Image: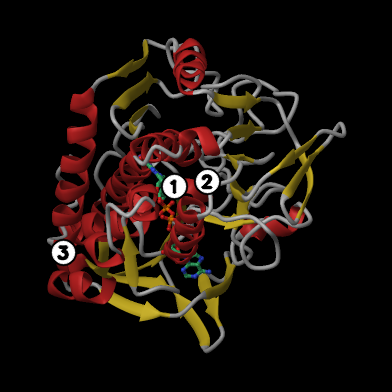
Amino acid sequence: MAKIVVIGGSFGGLTAAFELKRLLGERAGVTVLGDDERFVFLPSLPWLIMGHRRAEDITLNVPEILKPKGISFIREAATGVDPEKSKVLTASGEIPYDYLVISTGPYLAFEEIPGLGPERGHTSCTFTLGHAVNTKMAWEKILEDPGPVVVGSAQGVSCFGPSYELAYEMHNELKRRKLRHKVPIFYITSEPYLGHMGVGGLGNSKRFFEDTFAEREIKPLVSQAIEEVAPGEVRLRGGAKILFKFAMIAPPFKGVPAVTPLGNPRGFIPVDRNFRHTKHQNIFVVGVAMAIAPPEPTPVPTGVPKTGFMTVKMARTAAATISAEIKGENIPSAWELSVTCLMDMGNTAALMKAVPVLPPRQESITKEGMRYRYLKAAFERYFLWKMRHGLSSLP
Ligand SMILES: Cc1cc2nc3c(=O)[nH]c(=O)nc-3n(C[C@H](O)[C@H](O)[C@H](O)COP(=O)(O)OP(=O)(O)OC[C@H]3O[C@@H](n4cnc5c(N)ncnc54)[C@H](O)[C@@H]3O)c2cc1C
C-alpha cells in the first residue's frame, strides 16, 4: 500500500486527498497533515466582513469530512520536509511518505512592511477567518464613526480579488446607509494599472475597473509600494501619505517556512506541468504554494494569483498523475492553467475568465451582471456541499 501524505487541509489538500482515495482505494493510505481542523471557504470572507455570512456558514470540520472516506487526519503543523529521506518533519516526530502533496497556501509576510497588519501593525486584513472576524469589527466602527478608508494590495501580493471586492462592497454599504459622503475611499495597489490582477489583465479589465471605480468615486493609486504604515497613515515609497481611519491592506505573499527550502527565494515551489516538483519526483505541489513566473515585469512586484478554481484543478491533476504512476498507467496529460473568477461588487458582480491564465490567450473576458452575484452565492453552497461529501471529482 502506497503511503501518501498531504500537507494542508484546504482547497488543494482536501481535493487531492479525496481524489487520491477515490482513484486508488485500498492501494493507498492517505493522511492529511493540517495545522487547522477547519476548512474555511475563503472566497466568502469579504461577505463575513460585510455581515452577510457567519463563520459557521462557511466552515467545515476537516477530520469529520475525511473520516467517512477512510482518510486519516493529523492535527499538527509540518515543520519541514526531508526530500532525500521522504519524510515530513513535525514537532512530535517524522512521517514517512512514498508520495507527498504540498498545499500549504501562503505565508502572509506582514513583517516586510513596518506597521502593516492586524497583530503588530495598524491595518486590517481579510485572508484568514481570524483576520476577517477582526476586520468586521473594525469596519463596524467606521459605520458608527465614519472617516477615510484605504483598501488595497501591497507589493508582492498575488491575490488581488478580495481587495477589489471589499472596495465595491464597502462603497455599496456606505451608500445604502447614506454615509458615503462621509467616507473617502482610496484604493492603493502594486498593480501597474487597475485590473492587472497579476496576470496582465483579463479582457477589458483595465477599462472596466477604471470606469466602475470612477462611477463610485473610489480613488485609485496604482503601481504603489508601501514604505510603512503609521497609526492612521499609509506612507508610500516616493513620499506620499494617505490618511485613514480604517485600512484593509493585503500583505506580501511568501511560501510557508516549513516548505520554503524546496522553493525559490520567495519560498514558492517550482513544478512541472503535472505539478510535480522539478527536482524531487515523489513530491507534488498545488495551489498557492507552487511557483508561477509573472507574465511581465511590473515596476512594483506583483505575483500571479493561484485561485481556488486553479488550485482544485491542480490538485486533481496531481492526484491523477500519482494514481497513474502507482497503477502503472499512462501519465495524464497536463492541465493548461486557466482561471474563472466571480467577483462580488456589492450590488452587482463580474465574471473574469482567462484561458490560459497568462497571455497570449485563447479567451479573456471581464463582464458585469447581477446573475454573476447569484452564481457566486450558489457556487459557495455547491462547493461546501461537495467538500462535505468528499466529492472531489465533480467540477
Ligand atoms: C479572502 C479571499 C477571497 C478569495 N476569493 C476567491 C474567489 O472568489 N475565487 C477563487 O477562485 N479563489 C479565491 N480565493 C483564493 C483561494 O481561496 C485560494 O486559491 C485557495 O485557498 C488556495 O488553496 P491552497 O490549498 O493552496 O491554500 P490555502 O487555502 O491557503 O490552505 C492552506 C492550508 O495549509 C495549512 N497549512 C499551512 N502551513 C501548514 C503547515 N506547516 N503544516 C500543516 N498545515 C499547514 C493551512 O492551515 C491551510 O489549511 C480567495 C482567497 C481569499 C483569502
Comparing 234 with 355, the one in front is 234
Q: Which residue is mark 3?
A: 25
Label 1 with label 2: CB-CB less than 8 Å = yes
Q: Which residue is mark 2?
A: 290
State how far apart marks 3 and 1 are (Cα): 24 Å
Label 3 with label 1: CB-CB less than 8 Å = no
Eyeballing the image, is 356 above or below 173?
above
Eyeballing the image, is 283 above or below 88?
above
Q: Secondary structure at mark 1?
A: helix
- Amino acid carrying mark 3 in the image: Gly
At x 25%, y 57%, the residue is 20
Query: Which image quarter has ligand 1?
Result: bottom left
Q: Secondary structure at mark 3?
A: helix
Q: Mark 3 Cα within 10 Å, few/some/many (few <14, many 20+)?
A: some
Is 134 placed left or right of 343 in the picture?
Answer: right
- Amino acid carrying mark 2 in the image: Met
State how far apart marks 2 and 3 are (Cα): 27 Å
In the rendered image, which quarter contains the C terminus?
A: top left
Residue 120's quadrant in the figure? Answer: bottom right
Colour mode of the rendering: secondary structure
Eyeballing the image, is 213 above or below 9?
above
Eyeballing the image, is 231 above or below 375?
below
State how far apart marks 1 and 2 are (Cα): 6 Å
At x 18%, y 34%, the residue is 375
Q: Secondary structure at mark 2?
A: loop
Work out whether mark 3 precedes mark 1 in sequence or the reverse, and give the earlier one. 3
**Residue 312, percent from left and from top:** 31, 45
Q: Nearer the viewer, mark 3 or mark 1?
A: 1
**Residue 2, percent from left and from top:** 31, 68
- Amino acid carrying mark 1 in the image: Gly
Q: Which residue is mark 1?
A: 287
Is 267 placed left or right of 340 in the picture?
Answer: right
